[in-house]
Image (cartoon, rainbow, N blue to C red):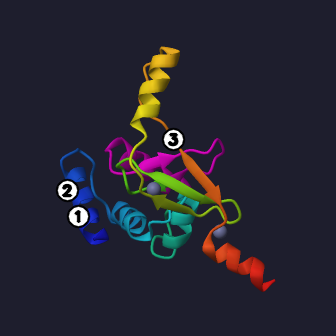
Amino acid sequence: MSAHRLQDALDALKSTRVRMTPQRHAILEFLYESMTHPTADEIYKALEGRFPNMSVATVYNNLRVFKEAGIVKELTYGDSSSRFDSVTSDHYHVICGNCGKIVDFHYPGLDEVETLAEHVTGFKVHSHRMEIYGTCPSCQGEKVNH
Ligand SMILES: [Zn+2]
Ligand SMILES: [Zn+2]
């Protein structure tokens, strides 16, 4: 399934003018296979052994290119550690307050909230973000063991 999605992303990229390089391919592959919403730094650490000349800035710049091409989504949290998501369709996230892990959570889109917000405030609403916070199963396990 992730191989299929990766191929779709590569095809989508081919239709833009973005040149595919081994580095770009590796970054995309990692993002699509990990499903963990990694930061640029985490991707860099996972791939630096294969690409000794690569820097965190290179990874980040490539992620920006992918974002502009519409094949990854950037999740900003008000600090420098943006996380990147290979699932670009609308979905919600459950976030572990202990280790920061982000897990996809599928729930019908709350479109009526947007409609109501528009109605009440007069804003032209284009999106919304809902996040669920808690403690992930592996962090719960840690607490029991220590
Ligand atoms: Zn956790
Ligand atoms: Zn996600």
Q: What element carries label 2?
A: helix
In this rendering, the answer to whether 48 lies above or below 76 is below
**Residue visible at 36% across and 67% down in the picture:** 29
Q: Which residue lies furthest to the top in this view?
A: 122
Q: Dot 2, how many residues are within 10 Å of its Cα: few (below 14), some (14-19), or many (20+)?
A: few
**Residue visible at 27% across and 52% down in the picture:** 19
State if disc 1 and disc 3 touch (CB < 8 Å): no
Q: What residue type is labelled 2?
A: Asp
Where residue 43 appears, x then y in whole percent? 51, 64
Q: Which residue lies furthest to the right in this view?
A: 146
Region rendered in magenta: 56-83
Q: In this view, does 146 lie to the left or right of 84?
A: right
Q: Is residue 58 visible?
A: no
Q: What element carries label 1?
A: helix
Task: Name the quarter where the C terminus is drawn.
Answer: bottom right
Q: What residue type is labelled 3?
A: Arg
Ligand 2 contact, mark 1 (Cβ < 8 Å): no
State if disc 1 and disc 2 touch (CB < 8 Å): yes
Where residue 118 appears, x then y in whole percent? 45, 21
Q: What residue type is labelled 1?
A: Gln
Circle number at residue 129: 3
- Image-quarter location of ligand 2: bottom left
Q: Does the magenta stretch include residue 66?
A: yes
Q: Dot 3, how many residues are within 10 Å of its Cα: few (below 14), some (14-19), or many (20+)?
A: few
Residue behind mark 2: 11
Q: Does the magenta stretch include residue 21?
A: no
Instruction: Out of 43 and 94, give the one closest to the viewer.
Output: 94
Residue behind mark 1: 7
